[in-house]
Image: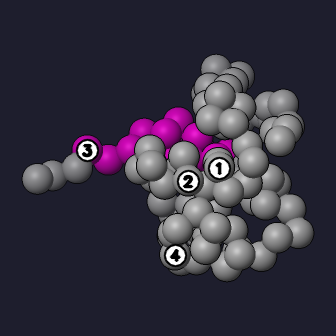
Amino acid sequence: MVRVPLSPQERARGERFGVLLREARGERSMVEVAAAAGVSAETLRKIETGRAPTPAFFTIAALAYALGVSLDALAGACAEDAEAGAGGGEALTA
């Protein structure tokens, strides 16, 4: 199966998502958050750096739960970014 390449907007959304996760992680280590979410530290690293711009839903849900962030807040921040361009959205709150 051939995967359709991501658009620049989809890549930018993935990068913004990574920034949001990094901000939500705060002082917690990547290993600690990844373990709490049940994903590998490498998976979290790829998401945070934008190298994995379209993670699976259950990966996103597990990370959101581990970070104490609602899926609505993540989706809203990413949707705002897509609509407003590469500017900042609202900060995520736990």
Disc assigned to residue 62: 2
Q: What percent of the width, then of the height, locates residue 83?
A: 64, 20
Front in this rendered view, residue 84 or 39:
39
Q: Are marks 4 and 2 in contact (CB under 8 Å)?
A: no
Q: Residue type at mark 4?
A: Ser
Q: Main secondary structure of the magenta part?
A: helix
Would you identify the image quadrant in which residue 57 lies? top left
**Residue assigned mark 4:** 40
Q: Quick one: which residue is furthest to the left in this view?
A: 1
Q: Are marks 1 and 2 in contact (CB under 8 Å)?
A: yes
**Does label 3 or label 2 sit earlier along the sequence?**
3
Residue at image point 79% right, 31% down: 89
Q: Secondary structure at mark 2?
A: helix
**Does label 4 or label 1 sit earlier along the sequence?**
4
Residue at image point 73% right, 54% down: 67
Front in this rendered view, residue 63 or 49:
63
